[in-house]
Amino acid sequence: MASDVAVRRYRAWYAMLLRLYPRPFRERFGGGMAQSFHDLCLEHRNANRGLFGFVLWVFFETSVGVIVENTAHRSQLSRTMLRAALVALGLLMVPLVASRMTPGWNWPPRAFVLVYVLFFGTALAYGLIARKMGAWTYKAGVGVALVAGFALGWSTMVQTADSGHPERLWYLSVLVVGFIGACLARVKAPGLAVTLFAMAATLALIAVILPSGAPPDMAGRMAIGHGVFVVLFLASGLMFRHASLARLK
Amino acid sequence: MVKKYTARAPLTPAVLHILLALSTGERHGYGIMKQVEADSQGKVKMGPGTLYGSIGRMMEAGLIRESDKRVDPEMDDERRIYYKLTGAGQAALEAELGRYRDVVAVAEGRLAYGQ
């Protein structure tokens, strides 16, 4: 009868094999696969059936799965990139057409290239992150966070260029908080919820501390703008929180 | 590439067996494997690679989903993820069984003529 040591050793080898799966697949199903393998090993051991032959079969069967999933993952990645490129192209049409119709809108070609890169990066980030979890609240949270982050970054750059107040670049620290938080959370819902709440708090803090230097009527509009962004970040954080709680139930 | 399963498209054997295993209730991965083995009288043995690859594609196609509740947390490991059929999964299973019934009816008719 195979010992517990043998079962533990096979399980450790199986965990190493699972590392060959694409990361999204491994994060989603790796735990379940390792648990199922362990259950099957115990079943074979307790029934006194040949464990080594069974383990060889599972390793072969899982290796085929590794090849299939890696092939599918690569083609899925290219499709996501193509979709992001097309969506970015569609969005680029808005400023392109508007610049032809609006007097005084004279962007140089490099500005359009920059805008395209930003649109593409945002759409690609949505495509790559949103597929990590099937819950609609997670996908909606990613969408709201990216759109709000993009709009905040864009308006900060435009206002800094127009007003000549470089201190307004402090608003970009909200995006830095978001980026670092998303990396630390490995884009998982519970960590993203905390990250979005931290972004909302950072923005509110900057809005209170940083003098706007704007006339009173303009300052009022800016306060409303800040409020909208804070609400969007909070809403996104609540959606991630809902997704993580649903996952735990 | 995610294969689109519709009520008209035939299912792969692995997908059919998983749908059949989940038709009587929510199950985790090991539970599905044991149910498939029981349903096929031991003729079909599904390993984790085939099972979870199929589960991933079936979830993306909307045939099954992770269950919100655990069947019995007192008796079971709470880390286990249970899966359940969706409405689309139930419809796809019924359509597939209907196709099987049609094929069997045709085959039996031909065998009867041949005798």
Image: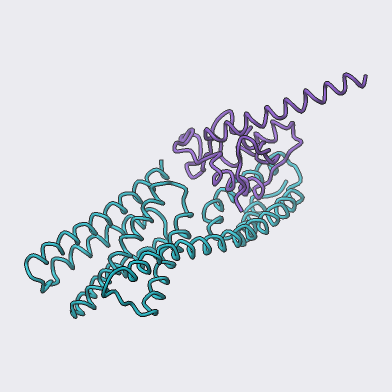
Above or below: residue A143 compared with residue B37 = below
List x then y, in percent, for residue A98. 33, 67
- Residue for point 19% across, 78% down: A167
In the picture provided, is A167 more to the left or to the right than A65? left
Tint of chain B: purple
Quick one: A6 or B59, which is closer to the camera? B59
Quick one: A14 or A176, which is closer to the camera? A176
- Residue for point 31% across, 68% down: A101
Quadrant of residue B12 within the rendered picture:
top right
What color scheme is it?
Answer: by chain
- Residue for point 70% across, 30% down: B99
Q: Which residue is most to the right?
A: B115
In the picture provided, is A224 more to the left or to the right than A142? left
- Residue for point 27% across, 67% down: A174
Quadrant including the C terminus of chain A? top left
Above or below: residue A245 compared with residue A196 = above
Q: Which chain is cyan?
A: A
